[in-house]
Image (cartoon, grey):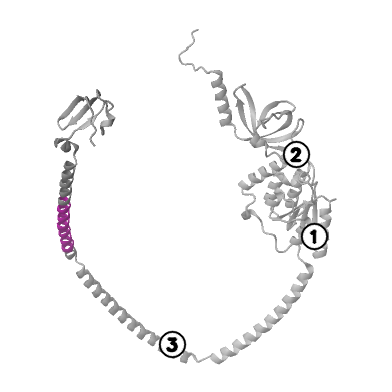
Amino acid sequence: MSIDTHNRQVFTVSELNRTVRQLLESTLPLLWVEGEISNFARPNSGHWYLTLKDQQAQVRCAMFKNSNARVSFKPANGISVLVRCRVGLYEGRGDYQLIIEHMEEAGFGALQRQFDQLKAKLANESLFDQAHKQPMPTSVNHIGVVTSPTGAAFKDILAVLNRRFPSIKVTLFPTAVQGDQAAGQIVEAIANANQDGRCDALIVGRGGGSLEDLWPFNEEVVARAVFHSKIPIISAVGHEIDFTITDFVADLRAPTPSAAAELISPNGDEMAAQLGGLQTLLSDAMSRRLQRLEQKTNDLRNRLQHPGRKLQEQTQHLDHLDIRLKRSMQAMVQLYRHRMTLSRDRLLRQHPRDALVQKKQHMNNAVIRLSKAVGQQLRQKMNHTEQTLHLLDAVSPLKILGRGFSVIRNDNNQVVKSTTSVRPGENLRARLSDGELHVEVTKTTITE
């Protein structure tokens, strides 16, 4: 079997490593990688070199001085970290490695990253848009609560509702609010409330806690369950400073469970006062309405006339309108006749023949002016050229030489200006008007 050696491409080792490095850097974007630090080294250069590993694999890493200066903790072997990096190749050894640009401790940082990524994803899908949010009902008779039955949040909600409007019905849809099973139970509780169909609004929440404690309310399945709920939902998760994904998706966000109960429930005392005021206003309005109707009835009785008299008035009014119409039509006809006369006169004054005569006269005048200007410019240029030629002839070096003068140069082509600059026996060249003379100095004489 013969091997074709003409079409094959041969790489040197350096070229191969360089090509592989370019492929890695151009193909893979910035990555987030989590692992445990080992083989950590910090040479005098200030750069960091380490290995990231998990239970099955490891990879070499480098973090240069300008990047590691921003790390807020002290890395060491055995610490789990989360790094943002790009993939590269160290060409000298052919080793694949990660170039780290950012490093943070794993745990809270990872959760915060997941929070930010999910928030960005749902925002791009318009789940946070105000256009999708359902308005809270103006009249609430039945409230559903999705929370833990043993937590303080449910007790706080009941206390507020009993104080403000005890007649509101409350249904608890129990669920865990912390731990791995909590997200699924919250989704199921929201679905049960929608299937039940009795509630005018839902309060979904729990008391405060750490980011890990509140994490079920940052799960994507919970966010989508809140978004698709047919019942308006108030998110009441944690304390006032806590924010979760559920807060952004919900139709309304309350800083605490107690605040959610305040927002959704009417104030019984205020309603009683409002009803008393409305009753007074209604009574006053009815009295004023009866007075106005009685006054209107009296006015109509006084204005009532015989039909024949009304017909005469209408006939007279019609005659006046006919006279005004005829006068108006005559005035309009005269106005339009006047406008037509003015337009005809303007057209006659602006006949194209007159405009052509004026344009032709302007063109003839312009041609005459142009001919005069060109002739004047030509004469000026000729006079200037003649004067310049006379001036050049007067200062011409050849004309000076023609009057008996010469220019003497030595062997270095330098002009001889004084007898002191030459020596006897030196050869010189004298430039005359019609050529050069080669002379030898036999004697120099200084003239005083």
Whole-angstrom CA distance, mark 2 to mark 3, is 93 Å
Camera-side mark, 2 or 3: 2
Q: Nearer the viewer, residue 221 or 415?
A: 415
In what element is the residue under mark 3? Answer: helix
Q: Check the picture and name the quadrant holding the C terminus.
A: top left
Q: Residues within 10 Å of mark 1 (few under 14, many from 20)?
A: some
Task: Tell me the quarter of the picture where residue 87 sits.
Answer: top right
| Chain-order first, disc 2 or disc 3 | 2
In the rendered structure, the answer to whether residue 364 lies left or right of residue 96 reads: left
Camera-side mark, 1 or 2: 2
In what element is the residue under mark 2? Answer: loop
Q: Is residue 376 magenta?
A: yes
Q: Nearer the viewer, residue 175 or 73?
A: 73
Residue wearing tag 3: 314
Q: Is residue 274 magenta?
A: no
Identity, as a three-letter code, of the amino acid under mark 1: Lys
| Residue 40 visible | yes
Q: Residues within 10 Å of mark 2 (few under 14, many from 20)?
A: some
Identity, as a three-letter code, of the amino acid under mark 3: Gln
In the rendered structure, the answer to whether residue 344 lies left or right of residue 319 reads: left
> Which disc number belongs to residue 107?
2
Residue at the far top: name it: 1
Q: Position of residue 73 (x, y in %)?
A: 74, 38
Are discs 1 and 3 less than 8 Å apart at CB? no
Compared with 142, 401 (above or below) is: above
Looking at the rendering, the stretch of residues picked out in magenta corresponds to 356-378
> Which disc number belongs to residue 169?
1
Identity, as a three-letter code, of the amino acid under mark 2: Gly
| Chain-order first, disc 1 or disc 3 | 1
Q: Residue at x 19, y 33 (%)?
A: 406
